[in-house]
Image: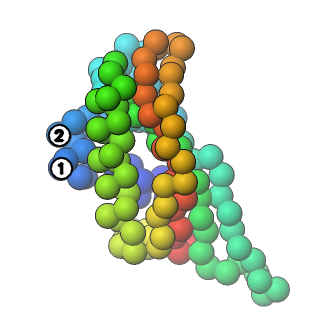
Amino acid sequence: MIEAAVLYILTHRAELTALVADRVYPQTLPQKPILPAITYTRTGTYQGYTKDGPEGAATPNFQVDIWNPDLVNARQVAAQVKAAMHAAWSTTVAGVRLGRIECTDDRDAYDQNVKVVGVTLDFSVQHRV
C-alpha cells in the first residue's frame, strides 16, 4: 500500500527523525500536538490505461504538511522531507516498488485551528501496481 511506503519514508530517515521524532500523522494533527510535526494526505491518483487495461503503474499525489511554531525551522524540516522522499526514488519501500518521486509544489501554510505556521509540499509518487 502506497500510504505505508510514504509513512516509512517519513519515519526512517535519521536526519528527519532527529527533527520530528515519530510525530508523523495521516491527514490531521492530534489535539494539542507536540511540534514540529508532519501530516500527510493522498490527494489523488493518476492510473494510466491502455486498450488492454491498466498499464501497471500509478502516480498518486501526496500533500505533506510540516507544522512548526517557527517558519524558518519548518523550512529546515521541509528540506529533510524532500531529501527523504527523493532518496526513495527507484527503491522498494514497505513492499512497494517506487519509481519517480517529484516535489511538484512548495508553499507556506497556516493552520487556523492550531494557530501554527508550516510548509506544504506536494509530491507525485510513481509506483508499480
Q: Nearer the viewer, residue 65 or 28?
A: 65
Give the left or right position of residue 120, taking residue 15 as reference: right
Q: Nearer the viewer, residue 98 or 16?
A: 16
Q: Is residue 2 above or below residue 119?
A: below
Q: CA distance from mark 2 to mark 1?
A: 6 Å
Q: Position of residue 111 (x, y in %)?
A: 51, 20
Question: Quadrant location of residue 31?
Answer: top left
**Residue lying at 39% horizontally and 69% vertically, measured from the top left:** 89
Q: Is residue 125 above or below residue 62?
A: below
Q: Amino acid at mark 1?
A: Ala
Q: Residue at label 1? A: 14
Q: Residue at label 2? A: 18
Q: Amino acid at mark 2?
A: Ala
Q: The residue tagged with tag 2: helix, strand or loop? A: helix
Q: Position of residue 75 (x, y in %)?
A: 35, 36
Is the C terminus in the top left, top right, bottom left or bottom right quadrant?
bottom right
**Residue lying at 29% horizontally and 30% vertically, measured from the top left:** 73
Q: The residue tagged with tag 1: helix, strand or loop? A: helix
Give the left or right position of residue 2, taking residue 33 as reference: right
